[in-house]
């Protein structure tokens, strides 16, 4: 009798854990408003001037907005930033060669980063309750 009860408990547990809708592949996409995020981190306005994509990330070279058109003294250089966004939601931000941010964008650390989920096969957006 005890063996039968254990078998029923295992079946009930498997039923609760089996969700066929979860078997479908999904894509998670992190969307970031880079200029606004850098403004939040530094207090300055920034613009993207180049980008480079690799297999596991995309990097953006940024400069302070208007820095390329301002006449600056020879001993000063405009502030430059490099933002690397990894496909897993991790990000690294360096400003003038110094680390400003190194962490996950998906942990709620930024008001300008949002996670969106899509069905991998159809591309249809998934709305979470």
Image: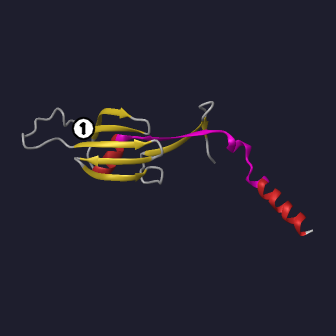
Question: Crowding at label 1, few (<14), some or many (≥20) Cα neighbours within 10 Å?
Answer: some
Res 23 quadrant in image: top right
The one nearer the camera, 65 or 107, is 107
Region in magenta: 15-34
In this picture, residue 104 sits left or right of residue 129 = left
Residue lying farthest left? 74
- Report how many numbered discs are placed on residues in the image: 1
Residue lying farthest bottom? 2
Res 25 quadrant in image: top right
Task: Give yes or no for residue 28 being in the magenta stretch.
Answer: yes
> Where the N terminus falls, by quadrant?
bottom right
Q: Label 1 belongs to which residue? A: 65
Residue lying farthest front? 3
Q: Is residue 85 above or below residue 53?
A: below
Q: Residue at x 61, y 42 (%)?
A: 127
**Residue 115 % position (x, y):** 51, 44
């Amino acid at each position: 009798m005890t063996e039968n009860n254990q078998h029923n408990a295992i079946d009930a547990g498997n039923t609760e854990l089996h969700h066929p809708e979860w078997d479908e592949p999904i894509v998670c996409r992190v969307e970031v408003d880079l200029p606004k995020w850098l403004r939040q981190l530094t207090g300055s306005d920034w613009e993207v001037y180049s980008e480079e994509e690799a297999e596991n990330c995309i990097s953006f070279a940024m400069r302070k907005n208007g820095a390329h058109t301002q006449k600056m003294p020879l001993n000063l250089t405009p502030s430059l930033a490099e933002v690397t966004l990894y496909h897993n939601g991790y990000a690294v931000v360096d400003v003038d060669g110094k680390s400003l941010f190194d962490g996950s964008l998906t942990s709620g650390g930024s008001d300008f980063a949002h996670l969106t989920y899509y069905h991998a096969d159809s591309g249809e957006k998934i709305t979470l309750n």
